[in-house]
């Protein structure tokens, strides 16, 4: 299950590049100002219909209330900031990232997780929609069950011209019982359509990641066995039905604890890439695997991290699907570092760029986005006592 993060002060980030041997030029992280307020957290990315970057975040006001906001970047400038929901009890955990996506019909859809009170471990998923980007529908709970248990760690994708699919976890019996992977279909009007269960025993504290391939949906999540093996699994929705769940790679990570650390998927047509964290080896690592058949089969994993990884990986696939940029947190002296590199589907590793360093809490759960010619990364304080940061990765 997900626990509240201990709040700490934000540590000043550092931007620098570090090249690996064999490459003539190292990439770099170019800091780009963003419109988020001084007390902001839980940054996330998506794209609009025309491919423009959309940045969303949760922001704390002077009166102590929180709002979910977003802004779109056109060319070299950010457009007006819009508020999606204000005064809500947002669950401010770095793994519980709100998200804003665009449907093919132009509708914007947002989801987030709320806690009824700070002392409870209950979580509820909410959704809201907007046809003009300004007026948002009244938030709707995205699941039938209303009991005081976990309904969280959600991810969303446009699954039709006028609908979105929300993937999330439900723990009806709390920490001592099995956690289920669920899917809710939401209409373009922000209304609950249907709900279904996909896997009845998954890791209850690790985020989900869902993408749309040329053949349907693909969900990457951390599975769970009765022996506490918690490896990454894939399940696909093709031809109107779900395939059996399968393990992406048999890491055989046995852990009777909550890693709060899972996978990140990207897709372009038939090409799929998935990065994930595992503690099965020493040191713990982030790996990447690729598929050229919409996730039916995957390559052997490529090791992306360079030392003792903390995980919290994000992935942004190339436009042609021939590779992906991967980010993760890694130990660096007494601090944590955000590192990123390009990994080709053939297994070739690009040079590493260090994006920022600080405490794990201050760095949050970094997120990547690739759109057009640009690759973006966002990160920031899980405590909300600092400002989210954004950078553009350049070669």
Image (cartoon, grey):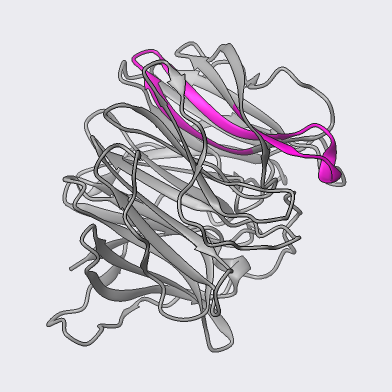
Position in image of residue 153 (x %, y %): 62, 41
Most foreground residue, 257 or 301: 301
Q: Residue at x 55, y 16 (%)?
A: 137
Which one is nearer the viewer's eye here, 345 or 140?
345
- The percent coordinates of residue 387 (x first, y second) are 52, 59
Q: Position of residue 71 (x, y in %)?
A: 39, 39
- The x and y percentages for residue 170 are 71, 33
Residue drawn 71% across the image and 55% down it? 228
The region drawn magenta spans: 153-182
User: In the image, is residue 352 part of the stretch drawn in magenta?
Assistant: no
Give the position of the C terminus as an image quadrant.
bottom left
Q: Is residue 126 left or right of residue 216?
A: right
Q: Is residue 101 above or below residue 22?
A: above
Q: Which of the pair 114/2 is nearer the observer?
A: 2
Considering every residue shown, the one lying at the far left of the view is 24
Q: What residue is shown at x 72% (from left), y 38% (from top)?
A: 179
Is residue 135 in view? no
Q: Is residue 144 visible?
A: yes
The answer to whether residue 395 is left or right of residue 49 is left
Q: Is residue 136 left or right of residue 228?
A: left
Residue 259, quarter of picture: bottom right
């Amino acid at each position: 299950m997900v626990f509240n993060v201990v709040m700490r002060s934000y540590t000043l980030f550092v931007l620098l590049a570090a090249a690996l041997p064999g490459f003539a030029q190292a990439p770099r992280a170019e800091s780009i100002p963003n419109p988020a307020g001084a007390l902001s957290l839980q940054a996330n990315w998506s794209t609009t219909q025309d491919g423009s970057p959309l940045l969303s975040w949760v922001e704390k006001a002077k009166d102590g209330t929180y709002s979910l906001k977003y802004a779109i970047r056109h060319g070299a400038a950010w457009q007006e900031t819009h508020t999606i929901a204000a005064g809500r009890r947002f669950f401010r955990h770095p793994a519980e990232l709100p998200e804003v996506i665009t449907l093919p019909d132009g509708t914007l859809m947002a989801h987030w997780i709320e806690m009824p009170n700070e002392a409870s471990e209950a979580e509820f998923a909410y959704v809201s929609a907007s046809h003009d980007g300004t007026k948002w529908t009244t938030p709707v709970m995205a699941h039938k069950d209303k009991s005081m248990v976990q309904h969280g760690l959600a991810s969303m994708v446009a699954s039709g011209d006028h609908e979105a699919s929300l993937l999330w976890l439900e723990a009806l019996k709390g920490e001592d019982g099995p956690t289920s992977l669920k899917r809710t279909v939401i209409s373009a009007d922000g209304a609950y359509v249907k709900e279904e269960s996909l896997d009845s025993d998954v890791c209850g504290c690790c985020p989900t990641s869902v993408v749309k391939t040329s053949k349907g949906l693909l969900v990457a999540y951390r599975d769970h066995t009765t022996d506490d093996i918690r490896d990454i699994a894939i399940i696909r929705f093709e031809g109107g039905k779900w395939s059996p769940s399968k393990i992406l790679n048999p890491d055989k990570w046995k852990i009777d604890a909550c890693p709060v650390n899972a996978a990140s998927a990207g897709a372009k047509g038939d090409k799929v890439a998935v990065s994930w964290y595992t503690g099965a080896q020493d040191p713990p690592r982030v790996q990447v695997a690729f598929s050229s058949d919409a996730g039916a089969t995957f390559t052997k994993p490529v090791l992306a991290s360079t030392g003792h990884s903390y995980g919290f990986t994000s992935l942004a696939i190339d436009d042609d699907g021939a590779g992906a940029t991967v980010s993760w947190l890694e130990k660096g002296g007494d601090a944590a570092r955000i590192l990123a590199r390009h990994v080709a589907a053939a297994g070739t590793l690009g040079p590493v760029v260090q994006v920022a360093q600080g405490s794990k809490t201050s760095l949050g759960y970094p997120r990547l986005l690739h759109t057009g010619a640009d690759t973006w990364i966002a990160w920031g304080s899980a405590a909300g006592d600092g400002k989210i940061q954004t950078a553009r990765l350049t070669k």
